[in-house]
Image (tube, helix red, strand yellow):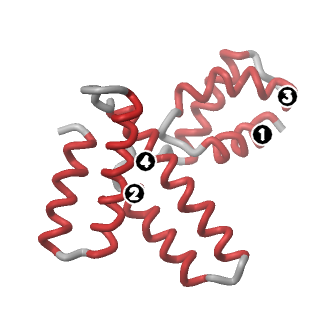
Amino acid sequence: MNLTERIAADLVAAMKERAERRLSVLRMLKAEFQRAQADKGRGAELTDDEAQALVRRLVKQRREAAEQFRAAGAGERAEEELAEAAILEAYLPAQLGDAELDALIAEAAKEAGAASVRDMGRLMRVLMPRVAGRADGKRVKERAEAFLG
C-alpha cells in the first residue's frame, strides 16, 4: 500500500471514529495530494517520494507557524499547529538517531575530504542525498558543523 492509499484508508477510519482533528488534517493532506497530482498532469500519480516530500513540507509549515504563534503570544494556537504536525509526522519514515547521523557525517566527511567548517559545502553535497527524508536539514547542518568544528 503506497502512502496516498494509506492516507485514504486512514481518512475513512478517522471518519468512522469521529476523530475531528485527525480527519481535518487528513482531508487537508488529501487535498494537497490531489493538487500536486493535478500539477503533474492528467493521469499522473504521485510517487511515494513525492508524497513524503509534500508531507515533510507541510510538517515544516506547521512547526514554523507554531513558532510564530508562540512568539505572538498565542500558545493555544501554537499547540494546535504542533498537534497537526504530529499527525502528519506519522506518515514519514523514522528519523535518524544522533548516533546514526553522526556515523553518516563521519563517513561523508571522509569521502568528501572535509576537515574544517570551510569544507561544509562539499560535505553537505555528499551527505544530504544519504539522509534525505530521514533527518531535518537544519539538524544535519548543526551536527555537521559540530563535527567539523
Task: Look at mark 3 in the image and give the residue it sits on.
Answer: 116
Task: Look at mark 2 in the image and give the residue it sits on.
Answer: 88
Q: Are marks 1 and 2 in contact (CB under 8 Å)?
A: no
- Left or right, 126 with reference to 119: left
Task: Say whether disc 4 or disc 2 marks the residue closer to the N-terminus.
Answer: 4
Secondary structure under tag 3 reads loop
- At a point 48% along the width and 40% down the height, the residue shown is 134
Query: Residue 146: percent from the left, percent from the top?
Result: 77, 43
The quarter of the picture where residue 70 lies is: bottom right
Q: Are marks 1 and 4 in contact (CB under 8 Å)?
A: no
**Above-or-below relation of 65 to 69:** above
Task: Look at mark 1 in the image and give the residue it sits on.
Answer: 145
Task: Say whether disc 1 or disc 2 marks the residue closer to the N-terminus.
Answer: 2
Query: Residue 38: percent from the left, percent from the top?
Result: 35, 35
- At a point 20% along the width and 51% down the height, the residue shown is 8
Q: Are marks 3 and 2 in contact (CB under 8 Å)?
A: no
Quadrant placement of the N terminus: top left
